[in-house]
Protein backbone atom coordinates (compact mmCIF):
# COMPACT_ATOMS: atom_id res chain seq x y z
CA UNK A 1 0.00 0.00 0.00
CA UNK A 2 1.29 3.46 -0.79
CA UNK A 3 1.48 5.59 2.33
CA UNK A 4 1.73 9.26 1.54
CA UNK A 5 2.66 11.67 4.32
CA UNK A 6 0.16 14.31 5.29
CA UNK A 7 1.08 17.96 5.20
CA UNK A 8 3.00 18.59 8.41
CA UNK A 9 1.45 21.96 9.22
CA UNK A 10 4.41 23.96 7.97
CA UNK A 11 3.22 25.75 4.83
CA UNK A 12 6.80 26.31 3.65
CA UNK A 13 7.67 22.71 2.81
CA UNK A 14 7.11 18.99 3.11
CA UNK A 15 9.59 17.10 5.23
CA UNK A 16 9.69 13.32 5.10
CA UNK A 17 8.03 13.24 1.67
CA UNK A 18 8.75 9.91 -0.09
CA UNK A 19 11.05 10.06 -3.09
CA UNK A 20 10.09 8.91 -6.55
CA UNK A 21 12.26 5.82 -6.06
CA UNK A 22 10.46 5.03 -2.78
CA UNK A 23 7.07 5.21 -4.47
CA UNK A 24 7.92 3.43 -7.72
CA UNK A 25 7.77 -0.15 -6.40
CA UNK A 26 4.66 0.56 -4.36
CA UNK A 27 2.88 2.09 -7.36
CA UNK A 28 3.86 -0.90 -9.51
CA UNK A 29 2.34 -3.19 -6.88
CA UNK A 30 -0.83 -1.07 -6.86
CA UNK A 31 -1.09 -1.36 -10.64
CA UNK A 32 -0.69 -5.13 -10.38
CA UNK A 33 -3.36 -5.37 -7.68
CA UNK A 34 -5.77 -3.10 -9.56
CA UNK A 35 -5.37 -5.17 -12.73
CA UNK A 36 -7.00 -8.09 -10.93
CA UNK A 37 -10.09 -6.06 -9.94
CA UNK A 38 -12.82 -4.14 -11.78
CA UNK A 39 -11.45 -0.76 -10.65
CA UNK A 40 -10.86 1.47 -13.69
CA UNK A 41 -9.26 4.51 -12.09
CA UNK A 42 -7.52 5.32 -8.81
CA UNK A 43 -6.48 8.78 -7.57
CA UNK A 44 -4.11 9.24 -4.64
CA UNK A 45 -3.19 12.71 -3.45
CA UNK A 46 -1.34 14.07 -0.45
CA UNK A 47 0.18 17.54 -0.48
CA UNK A 48 2.23 17.93 -3.65
CA UNK A 49 2.23 14.17 -4.38
CA UNK A 50 -0.46 13.06 -6.86
CA UNK A 51 -0.73 9.59 -8.34
CA UNK A 52 -3.37 8.67 -10.90
CA UNK A 53 -3.68 5.11 -12.19
CA UNK A 54 -6.06 4.50 -15.12
CA UNK A 55 -6.88 1.14 -16.60
CA UNK A 56 -7.15 0.70 -20.36
CA UNK A 57 -9.98 -1.03 -22.16
CA UNK A 58 -9.41 -4.48 -20.61
CA UNK A 59 -6.66 -7.01 -20.08
CA UNK A 60 -3.73 -7.04 -22.48
CA UNK A 61 -4.02 -9.68 -25.16
CA UNK A 62 -1.58 -12.58 -25.04
CA UNK A 63 -0.69 -11.81 -28.66
CA UNK A 64 -0.51 -8.66 -30.73
CA UNK A 65 -1.95 -8.49 -34.24
CA UNK A 66 0.41 -8.79 -37.17
CA UNK A 67 1.91 -5.63 -38.70
CA UNK A 68 1.64 -3.91 -35.33
CA UNK A 69 4.19 -1.91 -33.41
CA UNK A 70 3.98 -2.83 -29.75
CA UNK A 71 4.08 0.00 -27.22
CA UNK A 72 4.07 -0.93 -23.53
CA UNK A 73 1.10 0.07 -21.36
CA UNK A 74 1.42 3.40 -19.59
CA UNK A 75 0.36 4.88 -16.30
CA UNK A 76 -1.59 8.03 -17.02
CA UNK A 77 -0.77 11.03 -14.88
CA UNK A 78 -2.38 14.46 -14.92
CA UNK A 79 -0.42 17.32 -16.41
CA UNK A 80 0.65 19.17 -13.29
CA UNK A 81 3.86 20.13 -11.59
CA UNK A 82 5.62 17.41 -9.66
CA UNK A 83 3.68 14.53 -11.25
CA UNK A 84 5.82 11.92 -12.98
CA UNK A 85 4.92 8.90 -15.11
CA UNK A 86 6.31 6.01 -13.06
CA UNK A 87 5.42 2.94 -15.11
CA UNK A 88 5.33 1.94 -18.74
CA UNK A 89 8.29 3.79 -20.20
CA UNK A 90 10.96 1.35 -19.11
CA UNK A 91 14.08 1.86 -21.24
CA UNK A 92 14.57 -1.91 -21.19
CA UNK A 93 11.42 -2.24 -23.33
CA UNK A 94 12.74 0.02 -26.03
CA UNK A 95 10.46 2.36 -27.90
CA UNK A 96 8.46 -0.51 -29.36
CA UNK A 97 8.80 -3.83 -31.09
CA UNK A 98 8.49 -3.64 -34.86
CA UNK A 99 6.74 -6.61 -36.38
CA UNK A 100 7.02 -7.88 -39.92
CA UNK A 101 4.02 -9.29 -41.75
CA UNK A 102 3.02 -12.61 -40.20
CA UNK A 103 4.71 -11.91 -36.84
CA UNK A 104 2.95 -11.72 -33.49
CA UNK A 105 4.16 -10.88 -29.99
CA UNK A 106 3.72 -13.13 -26.97
CA UNK A 107 3.34 -10.78 -23.99
CA UNK A 108 3.58 -11.16 -20.22
CA UNK A 109 0.10 -11.72 -18.76
CA UNK A 110 1.24 -10.48 -15.34
CA UNK A 111 3.96 -8.69 -13.41
CA UNK A 112 6.74 -10.91 -12.09
CA UNK A 113 10.08 -12.50 -12.88
CA UNK A 114 10.41 -14.32 -16.20
CA UNK A 115 12.20 -17.66 -16.26
CA UNK A 116 13.03 -19.26 -19.60
CA UNK A 117 13.57 -22.76 -18.15
CA UNK A 118 11.94 -24.96 -15.49
CA UNK A 119 15.18 -25.01 -13.45
CA UNK A 120 18.56 -23.26 -13.62
CA UNK A 121 20.31 -26.40 -14.95
CA UNK A 122 17.58 -27.21 -17.51
CA UNK A 123 17.50 -26.02 -21.12
CA UNK A 124 15.07 -23.17 -21.96
CA UNK A 125 11.49 -23.98 -22.96
CA UNK A 126 12.03 -22.26 -26.30
CA UNK A 127 14.89 -20.60 -28.14
CA UNK A 128 15.09 -18.51 -31.28
CA UNK A 129 14.34 -20.70 -34.29
CA UNK A 130 12.16 -23.20 -32.36
CA UNK A 131 8.75 -24.17 -33.70
CA UNK A 132 5.93 -23.76 -31.15
CA UNK A 133 2.29 -24.79 -30.98
CA UNK A 134 -0.72 -23.27 -29.19
CA UNK A 135 -0.73 -24.37 -25.55
CA UNK A 136 3.02 -25.01 -25.50
CA UNK A 137 4.84 -23.62 -22.46
CA UNK A 138 7.24 -20.86 -23.53
CA UNK A 139 8.33 -19.69 -20.06
CA UNK A 140 7.39 -19.15 -16.44
CA UNK A 141 6.57 -15.95 -14.59
CA UNK A 142 7.07 -16.02 -10.84
CA UNK A 143 4.61 -13.72 -9.09
CA UNK A 144 4.13 -13.64 -5.33
CA UNK A 145 6.14 -16.89 -4.90
CA UNK A 146 3.88 -18.72 -7.39
CA UNK A 147 5.23 -20.13 -10.64
CA UNK A 148 2.83 -19.39 -13.52
CA UNK A 149 3.41 -21.24 -16.80
CA UNK A 150 3.14 -19.02 -19.88
CA UNK A 151 1.55 -20.83 -22.81
CA UNK A 152 1.69 -19.78 -26.43
CA UNK A 153 -1.59 -18.91 -28.07
CA UNK A 154 -0.11 -19.13 -31.56
CA UNK A 155 1.72 -21.63 -33.71
CA UNK A 156 4.87 -20.67 -35.54
CA UNK A 157 8.61 -20.15 -35.28
CA UNK A 158 10.18 -18.04 -32.52
CA UNK A 159 12.17 -15.33 -34.32
CA UNK A 160 13.20 -13.21 -31.32
CA UNK A 161 13.31 -13.74 -27.56
CA UNK A 162 13.04 -10.25 -26.06
CA UNK A 163 13.68 -10.95 -22.36
CA UNK A 164 16.46 -12.67 -20.49
CA UNK A 165 16.18 -15.41 -17.91
CA UNK A 166 15.38 -14.10 -14.39
CA UNK A 167 14.46 -10.65 -15.77
CA UNK A 168 11.61 -8.74 -14.09
CA UNK A 169 8.72 -8.18 -16.51
CA UNK A 170 5.66 -5.94 -16.45
CA UNK A 171 2.08 -6.69 -17.39
CA UNK A 172 1.81 -6.60 -21.19
CA UNK A 173 5.57 -6.53 -21.79
CA UNK A 174 6.63 -8.37 -24.98
CA UNK A 175 8.41 -11.65 -24.24
CA UNK A 176 9.05 -13.01 -27.73
CA UNK A 177 8.17 -12.58 -31.39
CA UNK A 178 6.65 -15.52 -33.27
CA UNK A 179 6.44 -15.82 -37.05
CA UNK A 180 3.08 -17.45 -37.66
CA UNK A 181 2.17 -19.83 -40.47
CA UNK A 182 -0.45 -17.47 -41.93
Image (cartoon, rainbow, N blue to C red):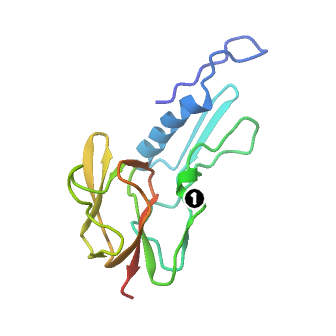
Q: Find residue 181 and report its image quarter.
A: bottom left
- The answer, for residue 124, to whether it is visible in the render is yes
Residue lying at 45% horizontally and 58% vertically, measured from the top left: 172
Q: Nearer the viewer, residue 86 or 119?
A: 119
Classify 6 as above or below 129: above
Q: Secondary structure at mark 1?
A: loop
Residue 152 point in image, percent of width and height:
31, 69
Q: Is residue 164 left or right of residue 15?
A: left
Residue lying at 31% horizontally and 40% vertically, measured from the top left: 144
Q: Nearer the viewer, residue 25 or 42?
A: 25
Q: Is residue 132 left or right of residue 45?
A: left
Q: Nearer the viewer, residue 117 or 171?
A: 117
Classify 150 as above or below 63: above
Task: Tell me the quarter of the image containing the C terminus.
Answer: bottom left
Furthest toward the front, the residue is 121
Residue 103 point in image, percent of width and height:
45, 78
Classify 144 as above or below 120: above
Furthest toward the bottom, the residue is 182
Residue lying at 29% horizontally and 66% vertically, measured from the top left: 126
**Residue that numbered label 1 is attached to:** 94
Q: Nearer the viewer, residue 160 or 39?
A: 160
Other residues around mark 1 within 10 Å, as few (<14) / some (14–19) / many (≥20) = few
Q: How many marks?
A: 1
Q: Is residue 150 left or right of residue 173?
A: left
Residue 85 point in image, percent of width and height:
63, 44
Q: Find residue 17 and report its image quarter.
A: top right
Residue 78 point in image, percent of width and height:
69, 45
- The answer, for residue 112, to whether it is visible in the render is no
Q: Is residue 103 left or right of residue 151?
A: right
Amino acid sequence: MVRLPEKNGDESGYEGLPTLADLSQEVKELVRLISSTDINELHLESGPVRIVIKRGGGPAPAIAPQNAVYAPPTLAAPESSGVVNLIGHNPAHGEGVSLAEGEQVVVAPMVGTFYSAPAPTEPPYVAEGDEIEPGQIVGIIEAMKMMNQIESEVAGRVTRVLVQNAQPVEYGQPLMVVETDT
